Amino acid sequence: MAESILSVQELTKSFGSLRALDGVSLDLAASTVGILIGPNGSGKTTLINVITGLYKPDSGIVTFLGSDITGVPPHRLYHMGIARTFQIPSLFTHLTVLENLLVAQKGNPGESFLKSLYKKSWEDYERRTVEKASRILDLLGLVSLWNEPSSNLSGGQMKLVEIGRALMSDAKLLLLDEPVSGVNPSLAHEIFARILKLRDELNLSFLIVEHRLDIALRYIDEIFAMALGKLIASGLPDEVLNDKKVIEAYLGT
């Protein structure tokens, strides 16, 4: 079995009397595209928020690359190699596509008062950063839009730029919240095809919350299904979608 990049063990999280997570455990293998499914209110977003440090769990453990990251805040996880996107992209609309990626690069010496005095140190850094951003734009199919104001992009293109911005952090694990929500089918397929390209060329892992299974199923390696705060099934797509508990959760029968 492939080594896990992310492991979640017996997570619980309550909001008052609502038990949003009820003993959730799952393992995501490295270099895998996993999808998290379930009816509205099943706990998917709460689970992502706990993994990414927005919420602290009431109990349980989250492990990333063998290290306990339970309750570690988002900014520290970002530096450790975990990045996420949200259902509604939040780009800097007055910046170009390229500039949106450049601002996400970590450790710019030009931002240091002392180091900024030595042009050579930050000039080389910025050249390498532009080269890195250009490669990411190429992988995302956005090279032709590099100088386009992000406000001029379609919703699907904005989601690709947000993925690109996450990649500037040198992330190993990306958690995507409905990356093709509201996107036309043609571009939705392209987004998932780009996700596979990123997995293969950059050795990335993905955990994706997505409702549009008609689009996503042909691109994913594993499904995790939730209902009422519990993980009710996991495994290969055909196995999970034919699981009686999953069918009952969606159909209510």
Image (cartoon, helix red, strand yellow):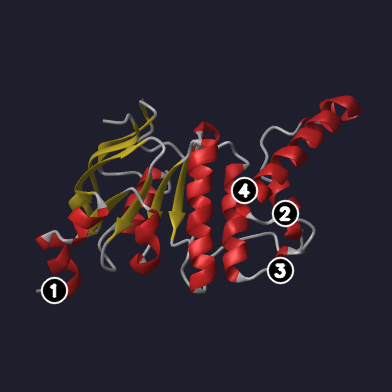
Q: Is residue 195 left or right of residue 230?
A: right
Q: Are marks 2 and 4 in contact (CB under 8 Å)?
A: no
Q: Amino acid at mark 4?
A: Leu
Label 1: state its secondary structure. Answer: loop
Q: Provide the residue designation for mark 2.
A: 143
Q: Is residue 77 left or right of residue 99?
A: left
Tell me the CA gap for discs 3 and 2.
Answer: 16 Å
Determine whether 228 is above or below 125 in the image. below
Q: Which mark is residue 139?
A: 4
Q: Are marks 3 and 4 in contact (CB under 8 Å)?
A: no
Q: Is residue 252 left or right of residue 215?
A: left
Looking at marks 3 and 2 on the same chain, the residue that comes earlier in the sequence is marked by 2
Q: Which one is nearer the viewer's eye here, 13 or 80?
A: 80
Q: Which one is nearer the viewer's eye here, 75 or 239?
A: 239
Tell me the CA gap for discs 3 and 4.
Answer: 21 Å
Q: Amino acid at mark 1?
A: Gly
Q: How many marks?
A: 4
Tell me the CA gap for discs 2 and 4.
Answer: 9 Å
Q: Are marks 1 and 3 in contact (CB under 8 Å)?
A: no
Residue at 80%, 36% (x, y): give it.
Answer: 126
Tell me the CA gap for discs 2 and 1.
Answer: 46 Å
Residue at 22%, 56% (x, y): give it.
Answer: 238
Tell me the CA gap for discs 1 and 4.
Answer: 41 Å
Q: Provide the residue designation for mark 1.
A: 252
Q: Amino acid at mark 2?
A: Val
